[in-house]
Image (tube, helix red, strand yellow):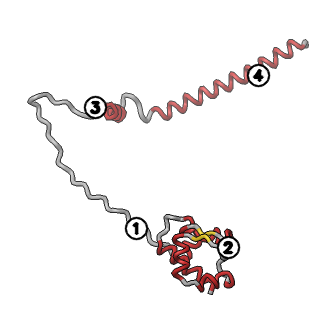
Amino acid sequence: MSRDQKFFDMYSLVIGILAAFALAILVLAMKMSDLTQGVYTRDAQEYQAAVEERIRPIGQVYLPGEEQHASAPTVEKAVEPAPVAAALSGPQVYNSACLACHGAGIAGAPILGDVEAWAPRIAQGVAVLEDHAINGYTGAVGFMPAKGGRVDLSDEEVAAAVAYMIGEAD
């Protein structure tokens, strides 16, 4: 057998397999089309109603002398304001805002539970610590951003976090 004949035979085989595969896909597609198109056809009443609803004009035009009956007025309820979110507790504020610095001692922040680091600060008084936490503080040792960088926290939430950290240092 010559090389040309081998090539021609192989080429014919590949073309035949591809043609059979394409025919199988065509038959499968036609079968699926028959199964799915029977549900919603152009002549069906539901289809026609859907088309009419889609292309219906937004407004109506009435000529002089024609009357339009208005629908009854509707009363809408006033939108109630969203409930105010409950204030976060001291541990929640600490975990969401304070932990980043006071957990690792970043920028001179005393670590939670370190009695020696907290003692001189506690000696200044709770009011001073709350003021530094709420308004921010720059000292010789480090820097405290206002509200720990979380300006969305209320003063009461920050004060609760300060109380929590002082309680952990006692």
| Residue 21 image position (x, y, % from top left) | 68, 26
Q: Nearer the viewer, residue 99 or 135?
A: 135
Give the residue displayed 28% in from the left and 34% down from the top. 58
- Mark 2 highlights which residue? 141
Q: Give the mark nearest the N terminus, 4 or 1.
A: 4
Kind of residue sitting beneath label 4: Val
Residue 92 visible in the displayed image:
no
- Label 1: how many residues lie within 10 Å, few (<14), some (14-19) or many (20+)? few
Give the residue displayed 11% in from the left and 31% down from the top. 66
Find numbered disc 4 in the image and state the secondary structure of the residue it sits on: helix
As measured in the structure, the alpha-carbon distance from the residue carrying label 3 to the one carrying label 4 is 57 Å
Q: Give the mark nearest the N terminus, 2 or 4.
A: 4
| Residue 90 image position (x, y, % from top left) | 53, 77
Q: Nearer the viewer, mark 2 or mark 3?
A: 2
Q: Note whether 143 is above or below 38 in the view shown.
A: below
- Label 2: how many residues lie within 10 Å, few (<14), some (14-19) or many (20+)? few
Kind of residue sitting beneath label 1: Val
Q: Give the mark nearest the N terminus, 2 or 3.
A: 3
- Mark 1 highlights which residue? 84
Q: Nearer the viewer, mark 2 or mark 1?
A: 2
- Mark 4 highlights which residue? 14
Q: Give the mark nearest the N terminus, 3 or 1.
A: 3
The answer to whether mark 2 and mark 3 are in CB contact below 8 A is no
- Label 4: how many residues lie within 10 Å, few (<14), some (14-19) or many (20+)? few
Q: Report the number of numbered marks.
A: 4
Question: Outermost residue, right direction?
Answer: 1
Q: Nearer the viewer, residue 143 or 3?
A: 143
Give the residue displayed 61% in from the left and 83% down from the top. 168
As measured in the structure, the alpha-carbon distance from the residue carrying label 2 to the one carrying label 1 is 38 Å
- Mark 3 highlights which residue? 57
Kind of residue sitting beneath label 2: Val
